[in-house]
Image: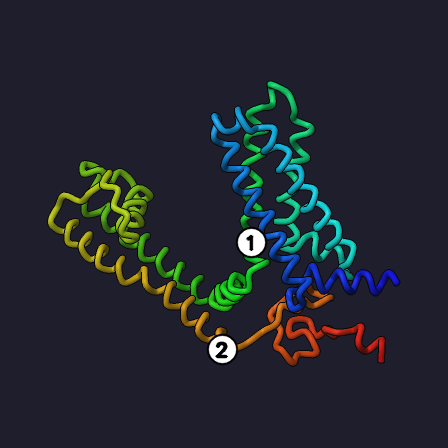
Amino acid sequence: MTYKVKHKLYEIIFEADTKAGKAFDVFLLILIIISILAVMLESVSSIFTKYGKALIIIEWIVTFFFTLEYFLRIWIVRHPFKYIFSFYGIIDFMAILPSFLEIFFAGAHGMLIIRALRLLRIFRLFKLTRYTSEGNHLMRALKASRHKITLFLFTILTIVIVIGTMMYLVEGEEHGFTSIPKSIYWAIVTLTTVGYGDIAPVTNIGQFFASIVMILGYSIIAVPTGIVTAEITRTKHKTVTTQTCPECLKEGHDLDAKYCKYCGSDLNPEEEEKG
């Protein structure tokens, strides 16, 4: 009986292929949005003075459901510690922790700490991606392109170090380039086309290098976008389910998959037990 209850809850909470699973995801999405709005409104002193009690009540109602969800996830999974120390497990814990910490920091002297703790509830934004299929698709694309993006960032880091060092030698301290780190800061600001203007080259050679960096910046911005877009396009044609592996808790399996492509475990062990 307990096994059937756990399996049913597992399908609802960890997957979204059923009506109950989709309804559960929508319900949590609404709670997350309400919670984020409450946090934002609490930061407005005039609103908090007038509606503070109502916002606190709303927050505790939301916290109750998130706490219930968190412990249900721990109860129904095969390996609770895998979930607890997973990315989403930590996010779920961070989503409920601030509300309970406020209990121990009540009082006038702790008001500043309490306000800071309230802001930690913004971690609930990370819970949004779990309950949207497009969010999961984007996460898979980012994960698939992580090696290319890492190489790209390493290349950019090398470029800004070289450019910063050259500008330090060309411009010197008299023109504001007082050190190599500060020159690297200028290179990053210029390469990303932010252009604060607090440091600017004065010499002809320095301005020539700056022009090259600016042009290079426009072309570099498109690179990570192209990498991720290519991965999104490549994985878009591949339809996957929201089924979660009961062993490793990973998603993204094919429609006809019987075994987890990450750990090799049976995705539907309950069907074999019935047979």
Q: Secondary structure at mark 1?
A: helix
Q: Between marks 1 and 2, how big is the CA–CA gap?
A: 23 Å
Q: State the residue lying farthest toward the right.
A: 1
Residue 172 percent coordinates (x, y): 20, 41
Front-lying residue, 11 or 262:
11
Q: Quadrant of the N terminus?
A: bottom right
Front-lying residue, 72 or 28:
28
Task: State whether residue 213 appears in this view.
Answer: yes
* Residue tagged 2: 237
Q: Earlier in the sequence, mark 1 or mark 2?
A: 1
Who's the residue at 20% across and 57% down the image?
Answer: 212
Q: State the residue lying farthest toward the top.
A: 108
Who's the residue at 15% across and 54% down the image?
Answer: 208
Note whether 55 is above or below 122 in the view shown: above
Who's the residue at 26% across and 38% down the image?
Answer: 178
Front-lying residue, 49 or 170:
49
Residue 59 percent coordinates (x, y): 62, 37
Note whether 73 is above or below 183 in the view shown: below
Q: Amino acid at mark 1?
A: Leu
* Residue tagged 1: 128
Quadrant housing residue 252: bottom right
Front-lying residue, 27 or 258:
27
Q: Secondary structure at mark 2?
A: loop
The colour scheme used to paint the residues is: rainbow
Residue 128 percent coordinates (x, y): 55, 54
Label 2 packing within 10 angstroms: few (<14), some (14-19), many (20+): few
Who's the residue at 52% across and 66% down the image?
Answer: 137
